[in-house]
Amino acid sequence: MKTIAITMDESILKSIDRLMADHSIGWKSRSEIIREAVKQFVAHLERAAEEEREREIFYRQRERLNRQAAALIKEQAKP
């Protein structure tokens, strides 16, 4: 793990301190809370980027996918 320095608003630090005061939360330091928050945020950004890539693929392939779906429906509708 690498140590870094960041600047944060006092209100955010007070919120973190309030969370830490609630011993049922389980975090022992501000660093733990901030690491977890950053980890979740990065995972969220990565998922959003992956979803955007998939949307672009579907958009580029939409005509072929529509033809395939129509053919499949037509095939399934046969008696």
Image: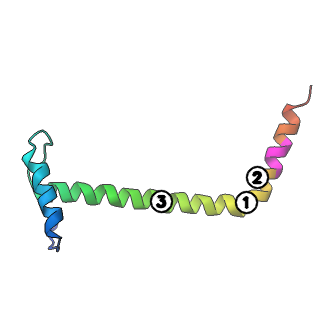
Query: Which of the two discs, 1 and 3, labels the residue nearer the N terminus?
Result: 3
Q: Position of residue 11 (x, y in %)?
A: 16, 65
According to the image, label 3 marks what residue? 48
Q: Residue furthest front?
A: 11
Q: Could you tell me the amino acid type at mark 3? A: Ala
Q: Which of the pair 58/11 is nearer the observer?
A: 11
Q: Residue at x 10, y 50 (%)?
A: 20
Q: Nearer the viewer, residue 50 or 27?
A: 27
Residue 76 sits in quarter: top right
**Element type at marker 1?**
loop
Q: From this viewpoint, which residue is outermost toward the top?
A: 79
Task: Relative to 77, say whether 22 is above or below.
Answer: below
Q: Residue at x 32, y 55 (%)?
A: 40
Which residue position holds label 1?
61
Q: Which residues are magenta?
A: 67-71
> In the image, 70: left or right of 49?
right
Q: Residue 4 versus residue 13: which sits nearer the camera? A: 13
Count of residue discs: 3
Circle 1 Cα neighbour tier, 10 Å, few/some/many (<14 / 14–19 / ≥20): few
Q: Mark 2 touching mark 1, by CB under 8 A?
A: yes
Residue 9 locus on image (x, y percent): 17, 70
Q: Residue 65 — which label?
A: 2
Q: Amino acid at mark 1?
A: Gln
